Amino acid sequence: MVLIALSPAKVLLAVGRNDIAFGMNRDTLKERYAKAVREMQAAGIEVYHINCIYEAVIGQNSFSKWITSHYTENVIDTYTATSNAHNILSADSVHPNQAGNDLIAETVIKSGKLK
């Protein structure tokens, strides 16, 4: 994994949406996610998890719940914050607009988990 070669102390992991959108089986996605986390942790990297971002096109609630249930201590709950907000997506109803990016950044900062 290229990321491991960079030797970061911490990683904020935010993946899954495109895999779901392009038809990856959710069990395969979970297995690959867990494997990546294990490999990073084995390399001494502290892994934090964004549990998805709410959007109007691809339902990510079940994957978000899986992340939250498997990585409880290091999850930053961006899914709830973004699902309760309005006018945070760009015209494609997928990507956050500036207000959405600000909300995500604020949620990460307020979590107090990354120092």
Image (spheres, rainbow, N blue to C red):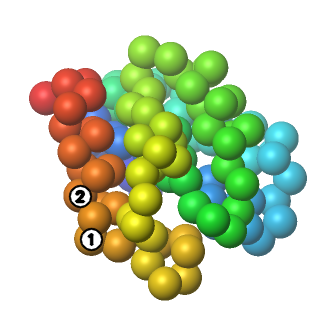
Looking at the image, the residue that sits furthest to the top is 73
User: At 62% across and 38% down in the image, what residue appears?
Assistant: 64
Q: Secondary structure at mark 2?
A: helix
Residue 43 in the image, given as x and y percentages of width and height: 40, 30
Residue 74 vertical placement versus 83 (above, below) = above
Pointer 2: residues within 10 angstroms few (<14), some, or many (20+)?
Answer: few
Q: In the image, 94: left or right of 109?
A: right
Q: Name the residue type under label 2.
A: Asp
Looking at the image, the residue that sits furthest to the bottom is 91
Q: Name the residue type under label 1.
A: Gln
Q: Which residue is mark 1?
A: 98
Q: In the image, 72: left or right of 18?
A: left
The quadrant in which residue 11 appears is top left
Residue 63 visible? The answer is yes
Looking at the image, the residue that sits furthest to the left is 115
User: At 53% across and 22% down in the image, what residue appears?
Assistant: 71
Q: Nearer the viewer, residue 48 or 91?
A: 91
Residue 36 vertical placement versus 55 (above, below) = above
In what quadrant of the picture does the C terminus appear?
A: top left
Residue 108 in the image, given as x and y percentages of width and height: 27, 39
Residue 28 vertical placement versus 47 (above, below) = below
Residue 102 - label = 2
User: At 34% across and 61% down in the image, what residue appears?
Assistant: 100
Q: Nearer the viewer, residue 25 or 52?
A: 52
Q: Secondary structure at mark 1?
A: helix
- Say whether marks 1 and 2 touch (CB < 8 Å): yes
Residue 57 in the image, given as x and y percentages of width and height: 68, 68
Pointer 1: residues within 10 angstroms few (<14), some, or many (20+)?
Answer: few
